[in-house]
Image: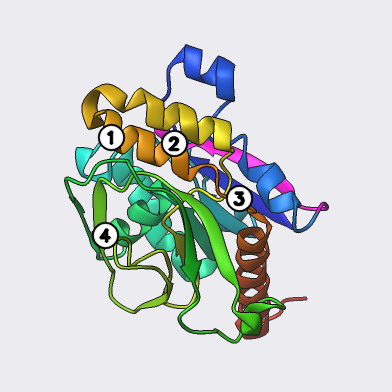
Amino acid sequence: MLIGILECGQTSPDWIEEHGEMAAPFPPFLRSADAALEFKVYKAHRHELPATATECDAWLVTGSPASVHERLPWQPALAQFLVGAAQQRAVVGICFGHQLLHDALGGVVQRSGKGWGVGVQAYPLQTVPDWAPPGALDGDRFHLIALHQDQVTTPAPDTRVLAGNGFCPLGITTIGENVLTIQAHPEMTTRLARDIYESQRAEQGDAITDAAVQSLQTRIDSRPAAHWVLAFVRHRLARLAATTPQTR
């Protein structure tokens, strides 16, 4: 399976030297569920987009230091691509990708004014879709690092909330048939998250930052989230193949 990564990162050279490109954590994150996956990266923030949505089997939209409502110059073209891709392929958005997809498909993203001090959260599953991976009926929870909680997403039409909590009720959602979104960072390491929290200390203050850093003591296991992403993608690929006329 070939997964196209739509990278939305705009980071400083120092950040890239320390942590790598924004797309870098996603292949190992998903390969924890399937070592045979292949990936191709498109740098959307540099206006590098696929010619067609069929270039890859599925699409993954990454996180970013940006905010949707900043309306950066590259966002409209990416949004237009996502609208078409959501009709032809399975599309998954994580963190900023979550917001970009809801925004592109009719949702609204606004500032919440609550800052970044959230940390590790466990999102209990509210409903079990038919494509859920094994273990979902056993009370599966997503242990995710939640960042970018300075933004609140009003869901796009035809959205189904799968898991969340009072602070971030759109933790995991599906939009229509082909779109899965996760408002968190399952691909992040504790060190990377801690560095992000610390970078906000001057703005958020010591109390919020210390609480966020302390929350990173919680065990983080991204593998359940990776299995859910791949279960969704495989389910949609099978359904799309079944409904696409075969040519000889």
Residue type at numbered disc 1: Ala
Is 39 in the magenta? yes
Image quadrant occupied by the C terminus: bottom right
Query: Relative to residue 29, is residue 63 drawn left or right?
Result: left
Residue type at numbered disc 3: Ile
Residue 207, numbered label? 1
Residue type at numbered disc 2: Val
**Residue 65 in sight in this render:** no
Is label 4 in a helix, a strand or a loop? Answer: strand
The residue at which mark 4 appears reads as 153
Residue type at numbered disc 4: Thr
How many angstroms separate mark 3 from mark 4 (CA)? 24 Å
Residue 132, numbered label? none
Q: Earlier in the sequence, mark 3 or mark 1?
A: 1
Coloring scheme used: rainbow
The spot of residue 241 in percent (x, y) is 67, 78
- Up-down: is 214 above or below 179? above
Q: Which of marks 4 and 2 is nearer the N terminus?
A: 4
